[in-house]
Image (tube, helix red, strand yellow):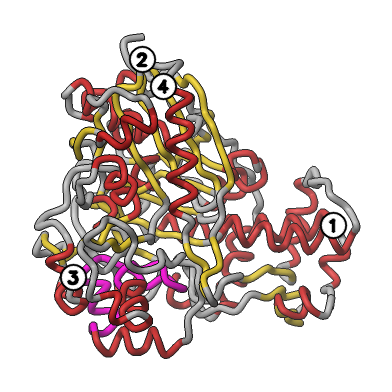
Amino acid sequence: MNYAIAVLDIGKTNKKIALYDDSMRPLTVRKRKIGTLLHNDLEIENVAEVESWFLTQLKELATEYPIRTISITTHGATVVCVGEDGKPVLPPVAYTNDVPEDVHQRFWEAMGPCDDLQKQTATAEIKPLINIAKLLWFQKERWPEEFQRISHVLFYPQYFGFRLTGIPSADITYAGCHSYLWDYEKWDWSSLVDLLGIRGKLPSKPSSPQSLLGKISPEVVMKTGLSPDVMVTQGIHDSNSSLVPYILSQKEDFVLNSTGTWCVAMHPVETVEFAPDELGKMVYFNLSFQEKPVKTSILMGGLEYETYSQLLMEHHQRQDWPLGLPSTYARIIEQQKSFILPTVVPGTGQFPDSMPRVVDSEKEYSLESLQTHRQWPQCFDDYEEGFALANLSLAIQTSIALQRVGLQPGTEVFIEGGFRQNPHYGALLGALLPENPLYLTALEEATSFGAALCGKSLVENVPVESLGEWVSLDKQPVQPASYDALQAYVDQFLIHLGQYSVLK
């Protein structure tokens, strides 16, 4: 081993440090859960704790491994504004904070209509504060004096890069991901940058995530014992990082369905355009490490599944995951009387106007009635049936999310993340998409691995595109289920949502 790559992978809850050798073999992974802090009435990111933990781990790892570069990847929708002293001048507000509806309304009044901005910036509105421009707007209203003292607006990967090098920057994958701050047509910062008054607080242009930000500062050298020649990448948005290995290894058209709390469907494309029905939905564009558009749709599939799983487990006083017999699915689909409808977090997903509820024999049960009053639909009295309904709902929502990113007949779909372990979800999705080959992929720590490829590109001064030989996806084909009445069940699902005529 000539050198090691250290990846700082900051998830919303889990923080990781993953090390790879120069042959892209994983050396070690260290993890810690670091949640948010409560600042008055707001949750804020605990950036000081993350930094302290990261530096401590680097100090230990530096005695074992020849670390040559640090590559950074973080979750989205987070920004840290620093003053002249390099410290946060505003609390780093977590995007999960609910804010009054009039905050959103004032934002639109000042910045322009939602649909117009979606066309201009390829950004979908995602509540609560998942659009960075809106998060900045909220901070500006809440702390107007402190906002005026901002020296640098730093996206989350670049904040930690700044702490390591002292150099402010921005990367293109973060700028172009549901931020409202990037104008895809002009290929420049959007008009909202000027309306917010932050153009001078950002670099003139964002950089490629695999490019050099700088070398670690003398202070970091002293705290970690690392060589002063250790390089730091610009940093990359986590969804785009997980996409890197697929772009490198796939020569044909594909869609990546990355599953977890957020299920993210990503489709590299050539042009940026929306169908009329996609405006107002969680359909937007990312920018890949190649600075090319990636049509993207999202839904909170993992949260939906977890919500109903916990309700069923509490109702039945069980903790097991039912086997799930094909006969149960066949009966539900044939009867077409029971449905779990989105959306657990209203305003999100592919049906943002839908309120979460269970339909059973035309009677509706709101999620609130289940959670608060324990009013159970009859279909939930059967433990296995309840889980089958949750799988059906998630598979239908996913199939629609995939279609909205431009899925074409014959296009391969890769399923990674938590739901690759759910065979019912995969089999149902295969049944819903009979013209598309589906594969499970076993790429461990895909986000960290993608960031490590960016680090290898930097160390060896080669294009990321030349590193495909180091990627092995280990594709496993999904065997689709077969249910004669499945399309009729989907039609009824959409009728209950009032979306049948729109999506047909």
Q: Quick one: label 4 or label 3, which is nearer the N terminus?
A: 4
Tags 2 and 4 touching, CB below 8 Å: no
Q: Quick one: label 3 or label 1, which is nearer the N terminus?
A: 3
Disc 2 marks a residue whose amino acid type is Ser
Start and end of the magenta stretch?
111-133
Disc 3 marks a residue whose amino acid type is Ile
* Quarter where residue 275 is shown: bottom left
Disc 2: which residue: 23
Q: Residues within 10 Å of mark 2 (few under 14, many from 20)?
A: few
Q: Say whether residue 500 is visible.
A: no
Q: Could you tell me which residue is drawn at 78 percent across and 46 percent down?
A: 324
Q: Position of residue 24 (x, y in %)?
A: 38, 20
Q: Which mark is residue 62?
A: 4
Q: CA distance from mark 3 to mark 1?
A: 53 Å
Disc 1: which residue: 383
Q: Quick one: label 1 or label 2, which is nearer the N terminus?
A: 2
